[in-house]
Amino acid sequence: MALQPFLALGAILFGIGLFGALTKRNLIIVLISIEMMLNAANINLVAFSHFALKPNIDGQVYALFNIAIAAAEVAVGLAILLSFFRTRSSSDVRDVNLMKW
Amino acid sequence: MLFGIPITGETVAYFVLALIIITSGVFLMTLQSVMHMALALGGVFLGVAGVFVILGADFVGIVQVMIYAGAITILMVFSLMLTHSGKSSEEGPEVGAVRGTVTFVGVAVIVGAILLVIRGTSWPVSPTAMQPFHQSTVLLIADALFHTYTIQFELVSAILTTALVGAVIIARKEEQ
Amino acid sequence: MIGMTWLVPVLPLVAYVILLASGRRMNESAAAGISTAAVFVSFLLSIAIVANVAAYGPAAPTVYPWLQFGYGMITVGYQVTSLNALMLLVVSLVSTLVLLFSRSYMRGDDRFSRFYQYLNLFVFSMLGLVVSPNLLQFYIFWELVGVCSYLLVGFWYFKPEAAAAAKKAFIVTRIGDVGLFIGIILLFLARGTFDFTTLFGGVSAPVGMATHLAAPLAYAGSKFFSLWYIPFAGWHAGPFVTLVALLVFIGAVGKSAQFPLHVWLPDAMEGPTPVSALIHAATMVAAGVYLVARMFPLFEASATASETVAVIGGFTAILAASIGLTQRDIKRVIAYSTVSQLGYMMLAMGVGAYVSGMFHLVTHAFFKALLFLAAGSVIHALNTQDLFEMGGLRKYMPITHATFLAGALALAGIPPFAGFWSKDDILTAAFSSGHYVLYAMGLIAAFFTAAYIFRVYFLTFSGAYKGDGHPHEGGPAMTIPLIVLGVLATVGGFINTPFDPMLGSFLQDQGPIGYNPPANWALMAVSALVGLSGIWLAYTLYRTSEGRAQRFAQRTGFLYTLSFNKFYVDELYNLIIVTPVFKIAAVLQFVDRWIIDGLVRLAGEIGYTGGVGVKYSSTGQVQTYGLVTVFGLAVMVLIVIGIGGVI
């Protein structure tokens, strides 16, 4: 196996996640897309850990940290979303417009 | 050899997993029902776990399955149910045509650029590319976590605690 | 004692500060008491100073360095010469009496303390002006005096006429001040100093003065003006001295209300009568005459300037006297009288009769202040200023009547009252120095003077009272100053009679100054006769049958109209100067409001409109922001790829 296919996979997954984050109307789907982007980053990290010039475990450790942080972010994000949903009765991205002029 | 690529077990596994991941991702983008989208998400996560295992990061792969495919997917489903997103009460198109096209073009350009860069860079190849680790990764990770990255470990645990408490407080119903 | 000269101006200043600090908390008696006491002490000090100067002669100026720049040094301080000491005495005496009078006159006024503050400030400025050792300090106090005049004339600022009169006074005198300042600067350029003693030091003869001043002036002038390419560089010495002298005289014309800048003084009668008595009779307007006296060597050095001074003085004397014949307001008559008498003083200075001019200044201060205060007493009692609403006050206000009569006789030049000696001195000087036309003008003006002041006397104090008030004498605060000034107007002339010219020897203790005409008994008799005939004319017109004055006015027709309308000088100025200035101002206002301010507002509007246009881009939609970011990133990536990398 070479390195490039894994990096390419990560890039494509990142692109799909980016597209979803910018386009989807449901807030939760946006969060999901962000999770996909984080996963793509994880793939990159582990790939580099495997194919490095001097193989080391740091990439995987960083990937673990990434997973932990992503989990924390999801928790808080969903909490905010629930609170927002209670106030506005909508989970549409277009209703999150308090910073409108 | 097929298309100049040696056919080994890993190659086949890689392609299958890549297919699963990308298909699930595309389904995520295009399916109409959000519940289906959540299921596609699960597929993406499982595929990524498989990629980790191929890359010899078995511990990380198991963690991926447990946390992502397990906890986070269920969390998303719960949220979708709590916010009544199960009912398709979406009025209007999911995404405007103009906006979708523009976004697609932009993203495509970026991804294309990244792919070009990946292709164009000469990545140094390690002699021990296939079997980098001689010990179990769990041991290596444990060693790294508690010796080299102790502070980062403690910080992450602090973040997790804060996020836990914060999420509970934010999502709490206000007392009347 | 000379070392305490600085106290003389400073005491009123202290009173001013005290009154200013206590504001409305101080009651009327305290305010008046403090002020009057301060100026009275200044008066006592002035007596001591005069005695000192009479005994020991003038002292060297006491100066303190203030500003040093390059080769020049500006100093402040004080100087006592015989001229200064005399002025100190006169100013402090009249000020004390006016301050005392105001206690009663301004009683009950809402801003009583403020009035006394302004008066104190004025006395301080005037006394400071008098003791100034150099031209710059003199000019500073000159301006201060102008400011105080503005404040005091416009004291009842809520009356639009008063506010307008204050503005007019300040602006018209300002025209004079510009000339004075240019003259001061030219003198400084020529001599490198502002000091009076250094400017004229060591050179007393007129010819010597001319070369003393003129050569360096011409040199400095040619150097200075050549910088600005003004073609004065080729002038000789003589014209320069004349130029400087005329510029200085312009300042005096403004301050002393000579023609053509006389228009502010009659209007300044809008101020309270004590103000008129103090400022516009005895002190501030005398500052112009004092300036000419102080700069006398300069005027001696230029025959043209002296002639100009004399001619303007003489012309003003007769012009103002002829206007005073027909005015209805009692204060205006006395105001035109002041202008006329100042003309006499300028006439004296112009023909070189330094002592005569100063003598008339002193006597005029006494009897004019007296006339104003007496008029103030009448106005206070009757609440009107119109002559034709008065009459028969002899019975009701005996003290005012007696003192006014004394002042009127002094003004008319009847012996042995004070005005006779001083006015006659001036007329004799004019005649003896060959200025026959000016003598004639002065004589006719004397006739008019006697006529108009006794017109006022007969209309006010004789006959029957036609009004409906109840006239009464004011309190002692009013009558004491009247009595004091009445005595001075009666006997004040004896300080410089031809039999015993005390004032002359006092002023000329360092040597003769100017032209001292010998006594001419024939001319004295002529003056007295002219005065008496003026009184006779007034008596005939106003004391005999009714309506005689009106018939006389109709018979003189055109002349009467000219005189009653002040020879239309104000209207002329309005036409030539005021209206064009306002039109230019309107144009400039348009430019300022629409073009300059328009540009500023345009900048603001651009910002605002641009903002309004741009604000619609902040939709609050994060996805839109993200999209824009991604798109921008894509563009940048393309560019980087296009230009082959950024390393």
Image (cartoon, coloured by chain):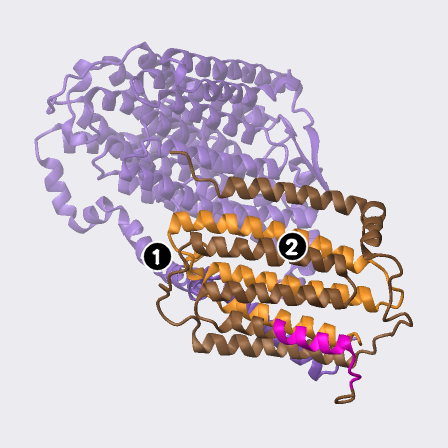
Chain colours: A orange, B brown, C purple
- Residue C325 at x, y = what percent? 24, 38
**As shown in the figure, which amino acid type bears the numbered disc 1?**
Phe
Q: Is residue C257 left or right of residue C433?
A: left
- Compared with A10, C340 (above or below) is above
The quadrant in which residue B173 appears is top left
The chain to which mark 2 is attached is B
Q: Is residue C112 above or below residue B8?
A: above
Q: Is residue B133 above or below residue C567?
A: below
Amino acid of disc 2: Met
The residue wearing badge 2 is B66
Instruction: Tell me if residue B6 is in the magenta stretch.
Output: yes
User: In this picture, is C121 found above or below A62?
Assistant: above
Dot 1 falls on which chain?
Answer: C
Residue at (52, 56) in percent of width and height: B76
- Disc 1 vs disc 2: which is toward the camera? 2
The image position of residue C563, as x and y in percent, is: 24, 45
**Would you say residue B82 sits in the magenta stretch?**
no
Counting from the top left corner in percent of width and height, residue C370 is at: 34, 22
Mark count: 2
Q: Is residue C501 visible?
A: no
Give the CA distance from mark 1 to mark 2. 91 Å
Q: Predominant secondary structure in magenta?
A: helix
Asked if residue C640 lies left or right of residue C337, the reply is: right
Helix, strand or loop at label 2? It is helix
Q: Nearer the viewer, residue A94 or C474?
A: A94
Outermost residue, top direction? C476
Q: Which residues are magenta?
A: B5-21
Q: Secondary structure at mark 1?
A: helix
Q: Quadrant of the N terminus of chain C?
A: top right
Residue picked out by circle 1: C582
User: Hey, which quadrant is residue C111 in on the image?
Assistant: top left
